[in-house]
Amino acid sequence: MKAYIPKYSNFAGRWIYDGYGRAWESLGFDVAEELTEDPDGLTAFTSQIPTGRENLEEEYVLMSVGECILHNPPLFLKAAQNSHKTFIHVQPHTFPDPWGRHRNFVSRMPDDIIEAINSLPNVHLWAFSDAVDIPGHYDKWKKVNCIPLAFDSIGYQPTDEPKYKQFDVSFVGGWANNGFDEKRKIIIEIFTAFKDSGLKCGFFINKNLTHQQECDLLANSKLTLNIHDAYQRILGHDTNERTFKSLGLNGALVSDSVGQLSRLFPDIKTSSDAQEMVNLVKQALSLSESELNTIKQKNKQDILDNHCYTNRVEALLAL
């Protein structure tokens, strides 16, 4: 069976849907990345997606980012209707201020298309957020299922012998301006606290590390660090992919405080106070090598068992 999935060339969407593509393929699907990017970074369907059962040689499943439907609603609706199953990642209709004033956080889907999507029994809706059951957020959609982000256990493979020194703690990321540019201030505050900590810190922001360099860096560090956006810290309904990547590659993580992260991984030490994050890293590094390795192996196994993109595909198919 074919699986049509989104394709991004950059930003977080690239790693998320590359991970999903490899997961679909590993589960026996013929992955057809028949989606292309528009200038807004969304995805638009091409004419190659099948729209009529009379022309189909086999069944297919379809994955979509909700807003890309706006590029060609009739084509999408016909493709969804004819699919075995369609899975649409949707945005809420209401989001707390100030973020809800920006198009990055709320759905732009008109009511008539929403109604058409809601009427298709083979279409299933999902979101990274666990706010899907909060009244008002997703009120126009039919049931929206929480499917968090995950670890790409197939694509993220560190080399056995990294070619650089081992850091006490590492972080790889970007400024990630989501429309309010709040994360830059958070990152600078945390990095300033670590600057005078005496720790060997491998922090790389917008440094264009290769995929392999990032894998090796995280896997070879004694500990990893995670930093979230302001809305994630305040609202707590979703965690970034770095959570799963850090735990999957390294197993030891200190993060700022985010509700969903703590609900998924209650043993992970968190704080949104920069100096306290430094203290938590030092406490973890004060453990014996054996104790720290035990923690790492436990967390890595939990990721492999429960939080890979293959797990998420299986959860989608079970809807």
Image: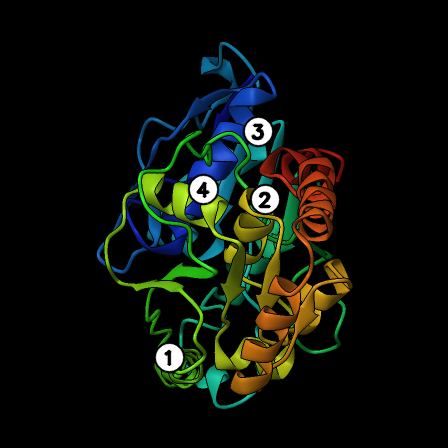
Q: Which residue is mark 1?
A: 195
Q: Which residue is mark 4?
A: 17
Q: Which residue is mark 2?
A: 248
The front one of 104 and 80 is 104
Give the side of residue 274 with respect to residue 299, left or right: left
**Earlier-in-chain disc, 1 versus 4:** 4
Task: Name the amino acid, label 1.
Answer: Lys
Q: Which mark is residue 83?
A: 3
> Can residue 212 be seen from the camera position used here?
yes
> Can residue 131 be seen from the camera position used here?
no
What's the distance in space between the residues labelled 1 and 3, CA to CA? 53 Å
Q: Are marks 4 and 2 in contact (CB under 8 Å)?
A: no
The front one of 263 and 10 is 263
What's the distance in space between the residues labelled 1 and 4, CA to CA? 34 Å
Q: Look at the numbered disc 1 and give the secondary structure of its residue.
A: helix
Task: Name the amino acid, label 2.
Answer: Gly
Q: Look at the numbered disc 3 and give the secondary structure of its residue.
A: loop
How many numbered marks, from 0 up?
A: 4
Q: Is residue 307 above or below residue 131?
A: above
Q: Is residue 4 above or below residue 124?
A: above
**Residue 111 in the image, given as x and y percentages of width and height:** 54, 66
**Earlier-in-chain disc, 4 versus 2:** 4
**Earlier-in-chain disc, 1 versus 3:** 3
**Residue 99 in the image, given as x and y percentages of width and height:** 47, 83
Q: Residues within 10 Å of mark 1 (few under 14, many from 20)?
A: few
Nearer the observer: mark 3 or 2; the answer is 2
Q: Look at the numbered disc 4 and give the secondary structure of its residue.
A: helix
Q: Are marks 4 and 3 in contact (CB under 8 Å)?
A: no
Q: Is residue 112 above or below residue 194?
A: above
Task: Name the amino acid, label 3.
Answer: Ser
